Amino acid sequence: MILILLSLTIDFSGSIYTFKEYPIGGEKYIMVDALVKKMHLSFHYDNDKGVMTLQKERLITLIPDNPFIRIEKDIHQLVVPPLRLGGKPMLPISSLDLILSSLLNKKAVFKNGILEIETSINLYGIKWTTEPSLTRCSIECSPTLKHFFSKNNGEWVLTLFNPIYNKEILNTTARGLINHIEIEEGDGFLKIRFKTKDDLPMDMIRKKKLLNIEVRKFEKRKIKTIVVDAGHGGKDPGATHRGIKEKVLVLEVAKKLASRLTEDGFNVIMTRTKDEFIPLKERTRIADETHADLFVSIHCNAAPNKKSMHGAETYFLSAAKSNWARTVEATENAAVRFESENSADIPDLDYILNDLAQTQFLEESQQAAIYIQESMIHRCNLYNRGVKQANFYVLRLNYMPAVLVEIAFITNVKDRKYLRDGKFLEKAANAIAEGIEQYAKEHL
Ligand SMILES: [Zn+2]
């Protein structure tokens, strides 16, 4: 006697399930139990009424030996009815396409004896980018795929809800700055756990069809190239008071600062060396193009309605934190109004702050600001107004830390005396240079 074991194959968008076939009375059946288990269906069998219900996306009600089935509220007729064999409910293979497509709400078709269930996959693949200081795991998926990213017990966990994918895509291994990756498949979710080298932080950035999970290692950069930016210029005088123009003073300080830094061996780039108008956008473009290591913008303060205000303050980029920071920010950003209409579109700060690199620069910018501010206070006998955060357009750089120095107030009697003195301006330039030197020492 030859025993032939037959089986049915179901291809559910790349996942292969096989079921034992039972030939009964010229028809072939599979066991409901096996289907329920493998395809994660809900199943209930009412012994008294002899009614069984199957549920996934939709609910189906069947009665053994009865060709009529109910799909939600609609009645359909099967060619071959379900039956019970030794108490176990069985489904006819000839009607499985209708039953499964109704249950799953997907297209199900027999092709060459295989029941293929087609579905819209929403998780397409996992791709990697590895660079010396960056490892990125890109989850390619539908923009509608829901996700949750969190840190638990030293592990970063990405949970994807109701993902539909081909199993092969899960064959992936950790690399670069990611030490360990573990994938857990659950009912209605997929968890991807990451561990990073030296417990480096991870970040998730959602782009339309990508979920980028990234780790970056920041190398302290050596300070070699510095952009010195004299604020304002040309048709934009900056703050003016009693014949003093900010654009003139700051150019003098910037020139002195540049020559001192050049003597120190830094490579220095100035955004302007004469009295000319340079749009803020152009200044940030110059700086970004040079890929310099630090950007220093030189300004003078003014408070026409509060002439007692005096002293030095140094800013780094951030959303303005105090009312005063907002005021200074509004004044310095006002140069935009001298620009042509088209160049006045200021990108949204949030967008830039969301960038991981910029976050890192904020820290370095703060450090540089602290060194410069302390040096100015120490050397120039100026009132210490502190290091502050504000949203200056000119500090929105992509590739380097950036600070903005407000040397003193041209609206204050004492400060103005300083500012009229060429020796003071030189002292201020040297103080800023020394702050930068200190900062650079930290980055050797
Ligand atoms: Zn200014």
Image (tube, rainbow, N blue to C red):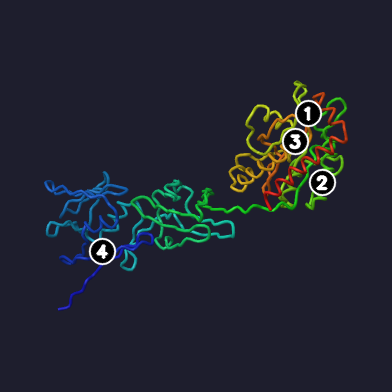
Is tag 4's residue or tag 3's residue first in the polypeptide sequence? 4
Left or right: residue 61 versus residue 101 is left
Label 2 near label 4: C-beta < 8 Å? Answer: no
Frontmost of labels 2 and 3 is 3
How many residues crowd mark 2 within 10 Å: few (<14), some (14–19), many (20+)?
Answer: many
Type of amino acid at the residue the image marks with label 1 = Phe
Q: Which mark is residue 258?
A: 2
Q: Please name which of the two marks, 3 or 1, marks the residue nearer to the observer.
A: 3
State left or right for residue 360 relative to residue 395: left
Q: Position of residue 358 (x, y in %)?
A: 63, 46
Q: CA distance from mark 2 to mark 3?
A: 20 Å
How crowded pointer 4 is (Cα within 10 Å; few <14, some 14-19, many 20+) is rated as some
Amino acid type, callout 4? Phe
Give the residue pinned by disc 4: 19
Residue 164 location (% of width, % of height):
40, 54
Q: Nearer the viewer, residue 161 or 426?
A: 426
Mark 3 to mark 1: distance in Å? 18 Å
Question: Mark 1 and 4 residues: CB-CB less than 8 Å, in contact?
Answer: no
Q: Of the residues shown, which amino acid type is indicated by label 2? A: Ala
Name the foreground residue: 17 vs 113: 17
Residue 378: mark in rendering:
3
* Dot 3 or dot 1, earlier in sequence: 3
Q: Position of residue 175 (x, y in %)?
A: 50, 61
